[in-house]
Image: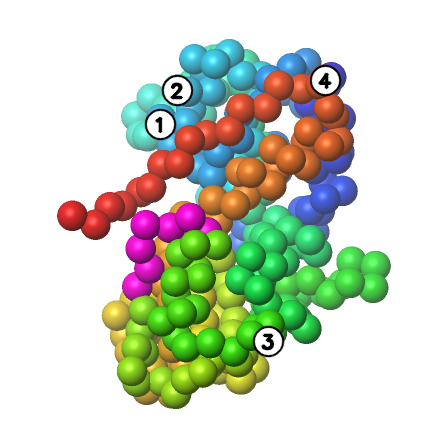
Amino acid sequence: MRCSEIIERLRELAPETCACDWDNPGLLAGRHDKEVKRIYIALDATDTVVERAVALKADMLLTHHPLIFKAVKQVNDQNFINRRILRLIQADISYFAMHTNFDSAPGCMADLAAARLGLRDCEPLELMGEMGEKPYGIGKIGSLKQPMELEQLARRVKEAFGLPFVVVYGQNRVPDPVHRAAICPGAGGSEIERAIAGGAQVLVTGDISHHQGIDSVARNMAVIDAGHYGLEHIFIDYMAGFLEEQFGRDLELVKALPEWPAVVL
């Protein structure tokens, strides 16, 4: 099966027109006409992931985060980004990324995360447009099926996303129980204002700074920082399932093992 056929299905799922203007999803390295039998799926194209894809003799690497965000003026071995690009090209691995287009497209990251959290009557936290008659955008805001204490919700986040820990801003500072919550996988600090405006009592996201956390609490919204990787690693399982459903036994799908970028000692 050609890489172009797989890309066509990926773009039907999450068109690149759904991506943010600053983003760079798509085929970032390799051949469009490459014959693909084995795909390695990961969140990031780290050195470990690239070397694992090479060792597995993968024909295609699929990640959520793009390796290339800005213009590459030289392709050599003088920096870590370029070395990864060279390694992929030398191994004849076609490399495709689905980033904010996957974050925002209907049925993808935002909807998947909201479903895991148990939100209902959801709407996009940051509305970006419509696909057909379905609104899409970054994050989701909605009501919990059952109101609960903040600590209970934090434990639900840990369980639903398989996390070793979360960081909670607002414990014993924000009124319980929680009825309305927002979730924004990835770095959601830029969505704080929208979450507050939408009436969220809690924002579940990642990459929250100290001041973003305490300032949100001062405005009566708690924040559960589940980590960037912590919320977005669901991309790997979902895309493996999607590709299996689309192509069956025509493709061998290999999922990257959990690779937490940070640990608590």
Q: Is residue 110 magenta?
A: no
| Highlighted magenta segment, given as a residue range | 161-167
Q: Position of residue 231 (x, y in %)?
A: 46, 53
Report helix, strand or loop for mark 4. Answer: helix
Identified at 31% across, 55% down, the residue is: 165
Marks 3, 1: nearer the viewer: 3
Q: Which residue is under mark 4?
A: 250
Rate crowding at label 3 as few (under 14), some (14 to 19) or many (20 or more) other CA atoms within 10 Å.
Answer: some
Identified at 53% across, 38% down, the residue is: 236
Whether pointer 3 and pointer 2 mark residues with C-beta atoms closer than 8 Å, the reply is no
Residue 47 image label: 1
Q: Which residue is under mark 3?
A: 143
Marks 1/4: CA–CA distance: 28 Å
Q: Quadrant of residue 189?
A: bottom left
Marks 4, 3: nearer the viewer: 3
Q: In terms of sequence position, does the residue under pointer 4 or pointer 2 come before the other? A: 2
